[in-house]
Amino acid sequence: MNKFRGITALKKIWRFLIIYGLGKTLFKVFGRLRLKYFFVKSHATADIGVIGCGQFAYATIGYCIWRRYRNRFVCCFDINKNNQRSFSKFFGLQDNLSNAYEVIHHHRVKVVYIASNHASHTDYAIEALQAGRVVYVEKPVSVTHEQLMRLLNTVRKTNGLIFAGYNRPFSKAIRRLRTEIEESNSPLTLSCFISGHLIEADHWYRNPEEGTRICGNVGHWLDLAIHILSWNELPDHWCITLAYSNQQARDDDIAITLTSKRGDLVNIVLTARSEPFEGINETINFQQNDVIAKIDDFRRITVWKREQLKKFRFWPKDVGHNLAIIQPFSKVHRNWREVERSTLLMLFIKDMVVAGEQFAEFSFSEEWKKLGVES
């Protein structure tokens, strides 16, 4: 049995090398093994504090920062002390911080990366903004309307810099698609089919207080839809239809359809009936006017535009993490207001799923009024 497990692990490493390249694959392996020896040399101008030291912080945030700047980490905290110790040892940091607020208020920290459990994101982001820090908060930025209201009020009051971990708009495929789209107020069709991770019924992602898988996963593609729709004029009013495969786990194997009065059609299907060997797999189809495009797992894009046919391949696979994560240090920024809108839509759909609703009408302007925050 151990022999077969070893062979399977080697196959997965080999496949990851083909997809992601050497550097990211090594960080994924190190993150799983939680290596605790000092590996990455500290940067002379280190200024990053990290809250939440799980696999994503270790393998993805850690890799993206190391890839561009080597090591800019100063300190970190995680409620899981093994995660905190292994992250600290790997990046050569002190590992005796007792809470997240010590990270935020550390005298060397200028930028706070938040990758903790979803329900904690808003409070940490607010504390960091009020402390004058630049904030990078992983998705979702909030899991309730009350959290979102407090966060947006703080953003407006402090006029602070805040960036979100919705990475797909930064992918090479989406950025390539953007260059093919002309100014138009014509309706579009967007279809996202996602084979996601298989998670247990008691996984913390499913907890209502953590926002369920709608906030944990589906928010990515709702955000991508808002980003693409915002290339032109974002319609205010939408009809939402949800189809549940399993009433006992409504945030799994779900189809979400959104239609606007303009004629836009957005369809998102998340299915997780088995664990994909190579990780999440996505197929995205797009059509507007005479532009048709297909994105295959962010490794290639095919674009048909009138009589033209264009094909582009991306290696390593680029889901947008590299550019998204370095936003605090880059000139390539996401429009934060897009994140606010996609979060508002995501929370509305999350509430529908929790209540078991299948049909609803959604208006951005009406939801902003309910929230009591300037849109």
Image (cartoon, rainbow, N blue to C red):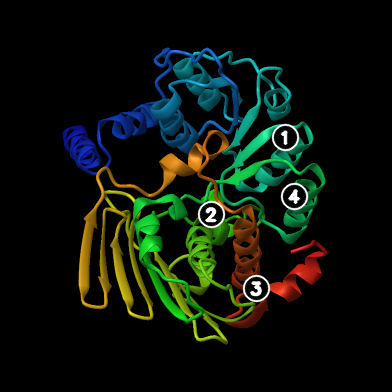
Asked which quadrant contains residue 93, the reply is: top right
Query: What's the distance in space between the residues labelled 4 and 3, CA to CA?
Result: 25 Å
Question: Is residue 260 positioned above or below 364 on the image?
Answer: below
**Is 14 in front, or is 335?**
335
Residue under label 4: 151
Foreground label between 2 and 4: 4
In the shown orientation, is residue 174 left or right of residue 21? right
Q: Are marks 1 and 3 in contact (CB under 8 Å)?
A: no
Q: Quadrant of the N terminus?
A: top left
Kind of residue sitting beneath label 2: Gly
Asked which quadrant contains residue 64, the reply is: top left
In the shown orientation, is residue 309 left or right of residue 178? left
Q: Secondary structure at mark 1?
A: helix
Query: What's the distance in space between the residues labelled 1 and 2, CA to CA?
Result: 22 Å
Residue under label 1: 128
Foreground label between 1 and 3: 1
Asked if residue 266 can be seen in this view, the reply is: yes
Kind of residue sitting beneath label 1: Ala
User: What count of labels does the image hold?
Assistant: 4
In the shown orientation, is residue 185 left or right of residue 11? right
**Is 234 in front, or is 26?**
234
Residue under label 2: 216
Query: What's the distance in space between the residues labelled 4 and 1, CA to CA?
Result: 11 Å
Mark 1 or 3, nearer chain start = 1
Mark 2 or 4, nearer chain start = 4
Q: Secondary structure at mark 2?
A: helix
In the picture, the disc for residue 355 is 3
Q: Secondary structure at mark 3?
A: helix
**Is 161 in front, or is 250?**
161
Q: Are marks 4 and 1 in contact (CB under 8 Å)?
A: no
In the shown orientation, is residue 302 left or right of residue 263? left
